[in-house]
Amino acid sequence: MTVYLASPCSQMQAASVESMPVLISFALWSPWLERYVPSFGQLLLDSGAYSAHTTGTKVDLAKFAEFAERFRGLADAVASLDSISGDWREGWRNMEAMPDGLGFPTFHDSDPPELLDDLISAAQERGGWIGVGLVPETRHLRGRWLKETLDRMPPELHVHGWACRRFWNSHRRLDSVDSTNWTLDGRKVLDACPWLTPAEATEIVVKRYRRERRTLPSIETPSLFAGKEA
């Protein structure tokens, strides 16, 4: 499982995630980020459609396609532009407008179930990645839908769960997820430990993510006295 830390929004944050998997969003791109890209361990590219939607802007599809081409061979994968309106036909058109081989599709819990087979075929032609996306407001209630969807995924596809970090332990078919919470967690650390600097708080959060990937699964430890009479 790979957890991509999403969209560093300051040079301090970008420096703190050296050698880590990072998600770059086109909508949140700043020229200074280019200097940090070589320092990231892995890279995933996204249009940032949701971020653009929440700020009242719109992603320019042609400019995103041009931007994505620069990352060909550098990024692990490039996601196509989602349709924030929930119109899967628009999302399909956006995918087809991407450069050849770039722009993997995403299947949403608001999409018709029969669409998944077509998206799987498209994913196999576009680098072998496919995304799964959940409506943010009800994401915590969609574990069953996610499991049933993952059960339909061919084993050769890499499945990325958008903002699905809460499911990564219970749904091992997810090959990667992304986290936007890591930037917010730094503020929580500062609230709890106000003597830290923002850089130190961010460092603590990043250490948590580094070590989380190496955490052993929990097992039931047998009693030292099992089977013995008192």
Image: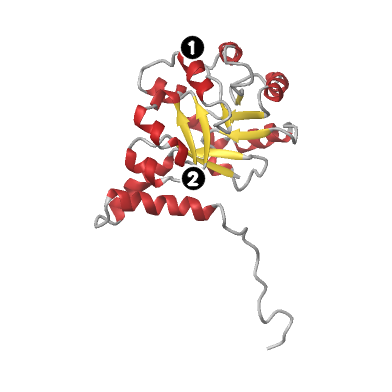
Asked if disc 1 and disc 2 are in contact, CB closer than 8 Å, the reply is: no
Q: Please tell me whether mark 1 sits on a helix, a strand or a loop.
A: helix
Q: Nearer the viewer, residue 218 or 138?
A: 218
Residue 168, quarter of the rendered image: top right
Instruction: State the residue lying farthest toward the bottom.
Output: 230
> In the picture, residue 32 is in which quadrant?
top left
**Which residue is painted at 35% across and 22% down in the image?**
55
Q: Residue at x 74, y 31 (%)?
A: 152
Earlier sequence position, callout 1 versus callout 2: 2
Query: How far, Cα to Cα, is label 1 from label 2?
Result: 29 Å
Residue underneath mark 2: 20
Q: Is residue 225 above or below residue 85?
A: below
| Residue type highlighted by circle 2 | Met
Could you tell me residue 10's position as x and y percent? 33, 37
Q: Amino acid at mark 1?
A: Ala
Secondary structure category for the residue under label 2: loop
Q: Residue 62 has which mark?
A: 1
Disc marking residue 137: none
Q: Measured from the top left, where is residue 189 in percent x and y? A: 34, 52
